[in-house]
Amino acid sequence: MATRESEVGFVPREMFAQPGAFGSVHATPPAADGVEESDWRYRAAVAQHFFAHAVNENLRIRGRHRGEFLASFSETRSLSAGRMGRILRGEQIATIADVLFWGGQFPHVLRRLSEYLDWWVKEPERLRAQQREQAEL
């Protein structure tokens, strides 16, 4: 389980067995020892991971570095390259404003996050269906 705390009581990347995977791999990173996959903090970390991965992927596709991209928003303190780096590495919690800023720049960011949230909402339905199928056997 995560040992450091942030303003919300956990550091997203520390929810993963391999914190360095945060925002850099396409798959869902496995939970750290002592972290249940059903834990809301793990699920929040996964959502932020997919958000960060989509942002990083879009910057790479465009051949842009985060700092270079954000330079034109330098008057907005919350969009500093340092803060965004911490968010995209999972060292700090992203806000809805961060998600909407990047989603406005790269619509794929919102689609990727939506895919995860849709899966999460439908997961209990799938589990119940599997349990019914197993009970019928």
Image: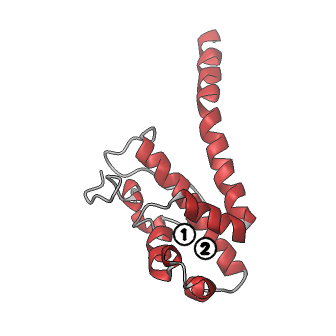
Q: Position of residue 98 (x, y in %)?
A: 56, 65
Q: Say which element carries label 1.
A: loop
Q: Is residue 32 above or below residue 89?
A: above
Q: Position of residue 69 (x, y in %)?
A: 63, 84
Instruction: Please tell me which residue lies in front, 50 or 75.
Output: 75
Check disc 2 and give the amino acid type. Asn
Q: Position of residue 68 (x, y in %)?
A: 60, 89
Check disc 1 and give the amino acid type. Ser
- Residue at 58% in and 59% down: 50
Q: Is residue 33 above or below residue 72?
A: above
Q: Taking the image as drawn, is residue 67 in sight?
A: yes
- Which residue is under mark 2? 56
Instruction: Please tell me which residue lies in front, 134 or 122.
Output: 122
Q: Residue furthest top?
A: 136
Crowdedness of circle 2 by 10 Å Cα count: few (<14), some, many (20+)?
many
Q: Is residue 92 above or below residue 134?
A: below
Which picture quadrant has residue 128?
Answer: top right
Q: Is residue 88 left or right of residue 116?
A: left
- Nearer mark to the viewer, of 2 and 1: 2
Q: Taking the image as drawn, is residue 54 in sight?
A: no
- Which residue is under mark 1? 24
Q: Residue furthest left?
A: 3
Label 2 with label 1: CB-CB less than 8 Å: yes
Q: Is residue 93 left or right of residue 53?
A: left
